[in-house]
Amino acid sequence: MAGRPGALALGLAAGIALGAQELEPGPSPTREMFPLFLTTMVYQPVDPSPLGRGRWRADLDHMRANTFEFSDVFKGAPPGTASGRITVTREFAEATAAAHAGLPVLFYFDEEVLRTSLKVRAGLSERTEVWAELPFISQGGGGLDSAIEGFHSLGFKQFGRDRVRKDQLTVAVMAYGRLQFYSDRPMRARVQDPTFGLMHRFLARPGLDLSLYAAVKPPLTTLYGVYRSGWDHGLGLTARWRAAPHHVLYGGVGVIRRPRGTLAFTTLPFGRMAGGWGGHATWEYRRWKRLRPFVQLYAQSGFLPEQPSQNLHRPSLQHDVGCRWLLRGNAALTFRYLNNITHNENTADMGLGLSLTAAF
């Protein structure tokens, strides 16, 4: 994975010295990292402040997210014991499916996902801009399990983590007694579908920006070499308000529509993924010249039909906490920590992100 994203980072860094305007990084680019949503468009915050005619900006964002989620039946008969950790195998998934043949769907996700994306924005006028984003995804066992278990030992225990082998990769989906999908092989630096967008600011007041945007994601690639979504598209409203000299607030809402994709995608045991909604609310503190800590709440609907023994249909709420360091030359470096607040087994457990932004 180091080759492609590394080259992107070098290209982005080379443009930092060309900056010619004060950088406004905007809200954090929070994105859902749950395995089911990796091949689809999901709600993401959009910066409501246009760059201006002839201006360019590039954002290189890297997120490492850990997911350990499974259907409710595993809570009654979890694999392994605290003193004897096991690896969840294909044979275990097949036996579990056979033991619950009456259930329409079961799932077991234990993996880490690395998502690196390059987003390029271009100002068409003082009020309108376009953007394009290209992501790369890797999947594997990772190395965050020990840190997460250590955190959970402080009183936030997550059921089952101490019963299975650390840093394993197991993705399994079962339906009506049969194993429908299973993967335990790493996936390295695979290109995913690009996203294209248009944003237009329709209200500008001192300290206030209010904009509309539209985005589309063409179905060009597959996930696991099998699943391809449709022509996903979204519409949204996004805002920025400087409430006080040291306090900037961001907020937005949007809807996602998912036309039908490939047969494999539309006939998932989970049911066809439907459209839904998302939203964000952000507080950024600007007491210091170059450091800008922030807290962002990120909500979205479940996108899936209700089924027994799981909560994938429920909405979710996550927090994205981080700090921006403004660099010389109209650039910024951002570190952030993403974690779920609602525990409905439909979000990634946690993620660590690093972003580099440059305007020119």
Image (cartoon, rainbow, N blue to C red):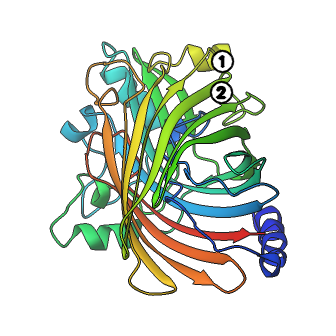
Indicate which disc, 1 or 2, sits on the residue closer to the N terminus: 2
Q: Quadrant of the N terminus?
A: bottom right
Point 32% across, 40% down: residue: 316
Q: Taking 24 as reference, is 191 left or right?
A: right
Q: Quadrant of the C terminus?
A: bottom right
Residue 34 visible in this rendered orientation of the protein: no
Q: Taking 225 as reference, is 102 left or right?
A: left
Q: Where is residue 324 drawn, in percent x and y?
A: 51, 76
Q: Where is residue 25 drawn, in percent x and y?
A: 57, 66
Contact (CB < 8 A) between labels 1 and 2? yes
Seen as rendered, the residue at the extreme left is 155
Point 47% across, 60% down: residue: 206
| Residue at which label 2 appears | 227
| Residue at which label 1 appears | 261
Vertical side of 324 occupied by 239: above or below: above
The disc labelled 2 sits on which kind of residue? Tyr
Mark 1, mark 2: which one is toward the viewer? 1
Q: Circle 1 — which element?
A: loop
Point 55% across, 13% down: residue: 267
Q: How many other residues sit within 10 Å of disc 2, few (<14), some (14-19) or many (≥20)?
A: some
Q: Circle 2 — which element?
A: loop
